[in-house]
Amino acid sequence: MNIRHLSPASFSSTGSKQPAASNRRSGVTSERVALLVLSVLLAAAVIALGVTLHENTQTKKNLQKFQEECEAKHLSEETCPRCEDGWEPHGGKCYFFSSVKLTWNESRTRCKSMGGDLVVINSREEQRFLQSRLMKKMCKPEDEFWIGLTDSEEEGEWLWVDDTRLNASLTFWCEGEPNNLKGKNPDGEDCVTMWAEDKAKHLKTWIDQSCKSSLKSICENPERKA
Ligand SMILES: [Ca+2]
Ligand SMILES: [Ca+2]
């Protein structure tokens, strides 16, 4: 190969050196600009995606919150009884455990003044509920609560305050009760109390007492209508 023949070419190459470098520099600059623009676009896209994801999450959260609130509202309307303050809901009824000690008649009047009456026990389940609540309400073992049962009209004919007769297969007398003792009151014992005790798993906690005794009481009220 003849090197001389290459010389002019190499010169010519040297001659065009300046514009080539300039081109390269301007190429590098435009590449940088393009890269910068791409970077900005990418950053903008990432931010936009982030905002969208955040908004989506917020929307989902808001929707979930709304559904929870709605379900809670629905639940309270459908299944939660509506009782006045201080009354305890159970099985569609409201119960008030009064710690004020009054005679049976006075207790009944007080329950009525609050829109209810002394409790009528219609089921084994209701007796069990009341007993479980009394376990917490009783301050001492001899604490007794009036219920809405009496034989004051005719001895031995037990009537509830709603005028229904006591169902013989649904009684919860303590052993030896009712005994109509006449020690405290010559009229005998015509009003009924109930109490509770850990050991009383048999549910038999009713006692007939003198209606004039001052004792605590249980009031009952139907739940408020919607
Ligand atoms: Ca009696
Ligand atoms: Ca008795």
Image (cartoon, helix red, strand yellow):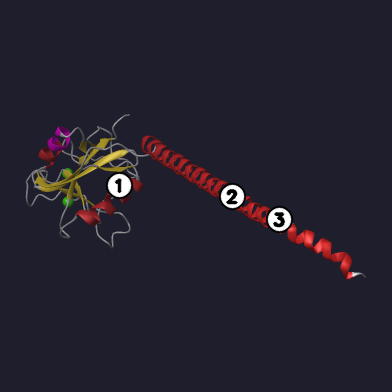
Vertical position of residue 132 compared to residue 116: above or below: below
Of the numbered discs in the image, which one, if any, rests on residue 51? none
Q: Nearer the viewer, mark 3 or mark 1?
A: 3
Percent x, y for residue 166? 28, 40
Query: Which residues make up the magenta segment?
Result: 109-113
Rendered-image quadrant of the C terminus? top left
- The Cα atoms of the two marked residues, 2 and 3, are separated by 20 Å
Q: Secondary structure at mark 1?
A: loop
Percent x, y for residue 207? 20, 51
- The Cα atoms of the two marked residues, 2 and 1, are separated by 95 Å
Q: Please state which of residues 22 and 208 is positioned toward the viewer in this rendering.
A: 22
Residue type pointed to by label 1: Thr
- Residue 111 on the magenta span: yes
**Dominant SS in magenta:** helix
Quarter of the view holding residue 111: top left
- Residue 169 on the magenta span: no
Q: Which residue is mark 1?
A: 171
Q: Which residue is mark 3?
A: 20
* Residue farthest right in this picture: 1
Vertical position of residue 69 compared to residue 38: above or below: above
> Is residue 40 toward the left or the right of residue 174 in the image?
right
Residue type pointed to by label 3: Ala
Task: Give the mark, 2 or 3, whose residue is nearer the N terminus.
Answer: 3
Vertical position of residue 99 compared to residue 59: above or below: below
